[in-house]
Image (tube, grey):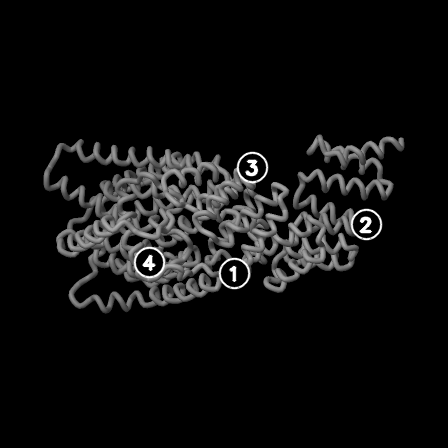
Amino acid sequence: MKEIPAAHEAAGSKTAAGIGVALALVTICLYWPAMGHSFIDYDDDDYVTANPVVREGLSWRGAAWALTTGHSANWHPLTWLSHMLDCSCFGLNPAGHHATSIAWHAANTVLLFFLLRRMTGALWRAAAVAALFAWHPLRVESVAWVSERKDVLSAFFFLGTIWFYTGFARQRRAGNYLLALLCFALGLMSKPMVVTLPFVLLLLDYWPLDRFAPGAGARLALEKAPFFALSAVSCVVTYLVQKHAGAVSEAYPFYFRAENALLSYGRYLGRTLWPARLSVIYPYHADWPRLEMCGCWLLLVALTWLALGWRRRRYLAAGWFWYLGMLVPVIGLVQAGSQASADRYTYLPSIGIFLMIVWGAADLADRWRPPAWAPALAGTLALAACAAVTEAQLRFWSDSAALFGRALAVTTDNYVAWNNLGKYYLTHGKNREALRCFTSSLLLREDAVTWRNTGRALAALQRRPEAERYFARALALDPTYIPARMSLADSLADDGKNEAAARLYQEVLRQDPDQEDAYCNLACVLAAQGNMAGAMTELAQALRLRPSDASAHCNMGNLLMDQGKLDQAAAEYRTALRFRPGSPEIHSNLGAVLALQGRRREAMEEFTEALRLAPNFTQARERLKALTDKD
């Protein structure tokens, strides 16, 4: 083999570096508008905005929780730690969380480019695959949705595993093998979907690493044994966690799920080639279109025959089975969640299709020998079209109203979209619109979540008796559904039915002793009944679970002030302000304590600050007036 001159190699490295920088910059610029987007009322609350442990930021307590929790029906501690780090750096400013996801996606793009160049030596083909991967509209869901941090994070370690594995395959260094194994473990701790990576490594041994010499199959499979062992452990852990959380459902028979899997393979391929009418969720339907199903079956058989039969084009088999194999964990044979399919699942599997397209197009160009500018122009137009559609798709992720409104426009019978659009309206005080959305969702499917949400809308409209019937209906459908029991208890407490509310809060705590909100609400009920000692005990439990809960500290301050323990009350209010510095209510309460202590000047400063934050805050104005009138 001839050696490449050092000068030529250096020039090639400079070109590759320039391409890598360009890929990163264009990717960041393309997704930059997401920096102005809000959180989404779909999982973002569970992962970040309403998750008390995550909101506290990085801590030893949070790290222990991340390593041991099955929250959100998954075990992905590295993803939790990533969200905690964002909260430490940016608080609940969504721009910072979006910036982190964009940065990870850009890093994945550059890593994929250098990885393909390293394995194949094909500079421009590697760049084309990386660009298609980065700028395709199907990537929007994984990048623009904060809750899908696990996609971009696991992909980085997935590609890192292949990088070190490639080094091991060429140089047989144990260090590279161990680093590959470490990256794989980190990938599994980010998202268990990467369990198929050992299978991908075998495909790469076939092409482009060319390690499948006669009789080498058993040796190569044995070489992957530690990777397969990690995959097996991850599969068991994931299944048990999802089963315990109720995310694994057998609502649909296996034959129905198999039909959906077949359709999903075809539909994912169709969306990759023609990314139109994309939705955040695609619901199940009672009857799948038989003609489309037959078409998907014929397409899969034809492409599999082509990949296996055209042995001189080994990239076809490698790319096609990369696509088929990587989708197996999420194709729906084991149903997890309510979606029939989801665009985010294509984040890594689509690389296989892009390998087939780019290498196939390059082979056709070599055979047909068109003018040199023609392939470059065709590739540029294809990438520009992808970027334009991605830019348009990104707009739908600006907030929940746009996102779920789009889902309702491009899908039918989408009860999940109706429910989540209702949640958005309810959060923003549009209670009648929320009730209409929840009612539309209930007409399509009755479940405990939607019954409870409909009750919340009715309660917000001051229709509490109706709301309580809806909460009770939700509990009848699912007696273990804690949010419905909490909502019913809250409604009863608002009606002054403190004994019934207290019983429900206590039931919640028997069901889950870590429900911090139940302790806080129970404390309020007990205080209303005159049981101050019991209320303080419950608040102490709440603060044990969430030491940074400003509301709990404020309530504790209220109880202490009522008992005349002014120094302790002031300390609690100051602690509450440390965690919620812009609260006019806490400033006003602290001012009231200071006034009782005779510290008039400091009290007036607190009342003035409360009025600066909320000029129409009547209580603070009256307290300040009462203090100045004494002068």
Label 1 – label 4 distance at C-alpha: 29 Å
For marks 4 and 2 on the same chain, the one whose residue lies earlier in the sequence? 4
The numbered mark, 3 or 2, whose residue comes first in the sequence reads 3
Q: Secondary structure at mark 3?
A: loop
Label 3 – label 4 distance at C-alpha: 37 Å
Q: Is residue 564 above or below residue 397?
A: below
Mark nearer the N terminus (3 vs 4): 4
Element type where label 4 sits in the image: helix
Neighbor class of circle 3 (other Cα within 10 Å; few <14, some 14-19, many 20+) is some
Name which residue lies at 55% across and 61% down. Answer: 479
Q: Which residue is mark 2?
A: 562
Residue at numbered disc 1: 69
Q: Say if mark 3 contacts mark 4, CB within 8 Å.
A: no
**In 3D space, how far apart are the residues under numbered discs 1 and 3 (Cα atoms)?**
35 Å
Residue designated by label 4 = 257
Tell me the amino acid under the disc marked 3. Answer: Lys
Residue 510 position in % (x across, y down): 62, 64
Q: Residues within 10 Å of mark 4 (few under 14, many from 20)?
A: many
- The quadrant of the image that shows the C terminus is top right
Q: Is residue 119 left or right of residue 158?
A: left
